[in-house]
Image (cartoon, grey):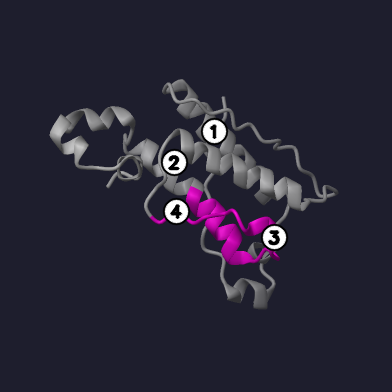
Amino acid sequence: MRQWLEAITDRSQSDITEKTPKAYLNAVDVNRIANNIAYLSDTLRRMGYITNANPSSNWSRSSNMTDADLRNLCNFIHGITLAFYTPAGFTSLTNLPTKQLDYTDVNSIERNLLRIYQMIEQGMTHNSMRSLTHLQLRARTHAQIRTGV
């Protein structure tokens, strides 16, 4: 069974300037992201949600990540939000494969995963909507209910 690996969401321009380890996207980062996607997917599946995100997490130093690989990771994250919720502050990842990746993009990927993880840990599920009356639910759109508004 997979475990959640602590996300890194605080990369900054100073990491780039000072050439710290956070300045570079490497196999450890990609494997952590892939692991966390699979962890969330497995957890949600056990909770009854339909999701099948299972990215490869066997990247090595010699692996070369392509735009298609990045697009797949972004699609897996999008699929998880479709099956579960779109958290407040979620950053759209649809344009990432078409532009040069920078530290803010990698922060966004990991921050999105962290927000979904935190929602699960806080017990935010469709079952939590049971506390709302029919009248309260009718006043909300599907998108509002999915985002927890």
Compared to residue 13, the image places residue 6 above or below, namely above
Residue 3 in which image quadrant: top right
- For the residue marked with disc 4, what is the amino acid? Phe
**Residue that carries the numbered disc 4 in the rendered image:** 90
Q: Nearer the viewer, mark 2 or mark 3?
A: 3
The alpha-carbon separation of the residues under discs 2 and 3 comes to 27 Å
Q: Which residues are magenta?
A: 89-112
Choose between 71 and 7: the one closer to the eye.
71
CA distance separating discs 2 and 1: 9 Å
Q: Residue 109 colored magenta?
A: yes
- Nearest to the eye among marks 1 and 4: give it: 4
Q: Is residue 78 above or below residue 19?
A: above
Which residue is the site of mark 2? 117
Q: Which residue is mark 3?
A: 98
Residue labelled with disc 1:
39
* Cα gap from disc 1 to disc 4, whole angstroms: 19 Å
Which amino acid type corresponds to the residue marked 1 in the rendered image?
Answer: Tyr
Residue 138 image label:
none
Secondary structure found at label 4: loop
